[in-house]
Image (tube, rainbow, N blue to C red):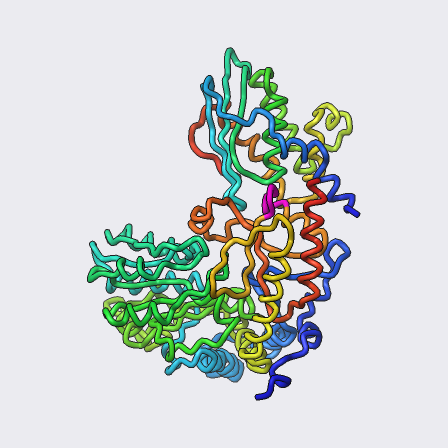
Amino acid sequence: MMDNELRELYQQVILDHNKSPRNFKKLDEANHHAEGHNPLCGDHLDLYLQLENGVVKDISFIGNGCAISKSSASLMTSIVKGKTKEEAEQLFEKFHALVTGKLKNGEEIEALGKLAVFQGVQEFPARVKCASLAWHTLDNALHNKEEKISTE
Amino acid sequence: MTTEQKIFDVQKIRKDFPILNTLIHGKPLVYFDNAATTQKPMCVIEKEKEYYTSANSNIHRGVHTLSQKATTEYEQTRQKVMKFINAERLSELIFTKGTTDSINLVASSFGKKFIKAGDEIIISHLEHHSNIVPWQLLCEEKGAALKVIPINDKGEIIFDAFEKLISEKTKLISVVYVSNSLGTVNPVKEIIQLAHSKDIPVLLDAAQAVQHFKIDVQEIDCDFLAFSGHKLYAPTGVGILYGKEKYLEEMPPYQGGGDMIASVTFEKTSYNELPYKFEAGTPNIAGVVGFGSAVDYLNTIGIENISLYEKELFDYAVKKLSAVDKLKPIGTAEKKLSVFSFMLEGIHPHDIGTILDFDGIAIRTGHHCTQPVMQRFGIPATARISLSFYNTKEEIDYTADAIKKVFEVFG
């Protein structure tokens, strides 16, 4: 019998993206790249971004991490593809608010679509960094900061 | 001593540790993170409280009654630790903040006096970051070089390679006694004998050793020994550096301040005698007093009894857990104790840690501050169970079942 809270954290969508991550490859056409690292648990990812006229034309990642960080990166790449830089930034802001428990409005949470599966993370302060690593890395790639980013 | 007398009653022991009654997510706590820190017996907790309620004062200063009482209790711990590791002199025992502080003391002070450009320091691939980074900082400052003893696929140091690393340039060897991430017990006697045949001093990081078996510093003949109180059932923030007097006398002070001086003028300061030369400022007196109580507690149980019980428990854990399907133990040294590091096929250790926590099981997941060990095995992290004498076979059975449930979550 699995606890409800645990089921909230490890939702089917998360387990599915962990098992078969989308956009899990190096992107040869990338014109932006950033590296993300969580020294606490050793999670690591490389994010590749093809940005054209302010629009995310393509995006991919490769790396190593727990189910939360890997599925978060996978879902993120699926969702920001085709979005403008500004839209991606707004999503990051909302996502961050969601996993830190600051997004209370049900409609706003719903508007996040599939990303809402990460709502359960707010109950696990130690795992917030896992969920947000990919987004911090995306933020860096969007702003073309080449330096390695760390969630510590 | 008969066998019957050696075996202790673990249920009785567990009553000494109030935290073991805690419920986590509604389940009884199974505390398997003892290599990170051990829980504290009631006598240690009470001792700290008693100190603050009846003896609190500064040490080595006042003539008033409380100051003398505080000083006596503080110094009694030094005597207890001296006996515990069979050191020859009180002057060879320095109170520090912990293992990291002890190693930094040697790196800074021994380094200042004895390490020059072109010299070499040897460590092993098994080291905790606290026995890597202080030496890197020193080598960088002095233009010295750090040499690393490689390990094999089981997680044991390769002794032949160690022999080849030693040269006339080697000025110090600093190795871990028991690996915190793999549980490997290093052949420290052989290392020390070989080092001493070439007049090279050896520092042992005993942070994961001193709580598990009897260490006799005169018998193993190490030149420095570093360990923490908090992994030895004592409060956090206190530790020990044991050092042979012949080195400590030659070494300059680590920090300047009160208590470490004999006399101060603006022209010249002369330093206090050992061990006070290395104890600048007001220390963690309550912690040290609690430390003394922890040593008393361990003596009452008997460190030999602890070793016997923990060996039986560890052998049981290795057998039981290794039998779990799709579980891969990391580090399979012939001589191992207390630490069982593992991976589950297709599941990241961090997820294992979160899921086991729901069953009340506290384990460590991550690189355990030994990133080079993780790199050696080509993995980002492991899940680690580390045992204490208050753990039971029932807890291991319960954990083996809980690990099977991790696979259920991941389908």
Residue at point 42% right, 81% down? B86
Q: Position of residue B101 (x, y in %)?
A: 42, 62
Of residue B376 and residue A86, the one placed in the foreground of this image is B376
- State which quadrant residue B88 falls in: bottom left
- Please name whichever residue, B109 or B131, is drawn nearer the observer in this view of the structure: B131
Question: What is the count of numbered marks?
Answer: 0
**Which region shows up in magenta?**
B344-351
Left or right position of B288 against B405: left
Q: From what the image shows, is residue B165 above or below residue B74?
A: above
Quadrant occupied by the C terminus of chain B: top right
Is residue B168 rendered magenta in the image? Answer: no
Q: Residue furthest top?
A: A53
Residue drawn where x is 42% and y is 68% of the image:
B226
What percent of the width, then of the height, locates residue A134? Answer: 56, 32
Is residue B276 toward the left or the right of residue B198 in the image? right
Image point (62%, 40%), residue name: A128
| Image quarter in which the N terminus of chain B is found | bottom right
Query: Is residue B232 left or right of A31 when viewed as pictured?
Result: right
Image quadrant of residue B43? Answer: bottom right
Residue B345 included in the magenta stretch of the image: yes
Is residue B269 among the parts visible in the rendering? yes
B231 displayed left or right of B221? right
Q: In this view of the protein, can residue B71 be seen by the observer?
A: no
Residue B64: give x, y in percent of width and height.
Answer: 50, 83
- In this view, B227 is above or below A98: below
Query: Which residue is rendered at x = 51% and y = 11% of the image?
Result: A53
Percent x, y for residue B51?
58, 76
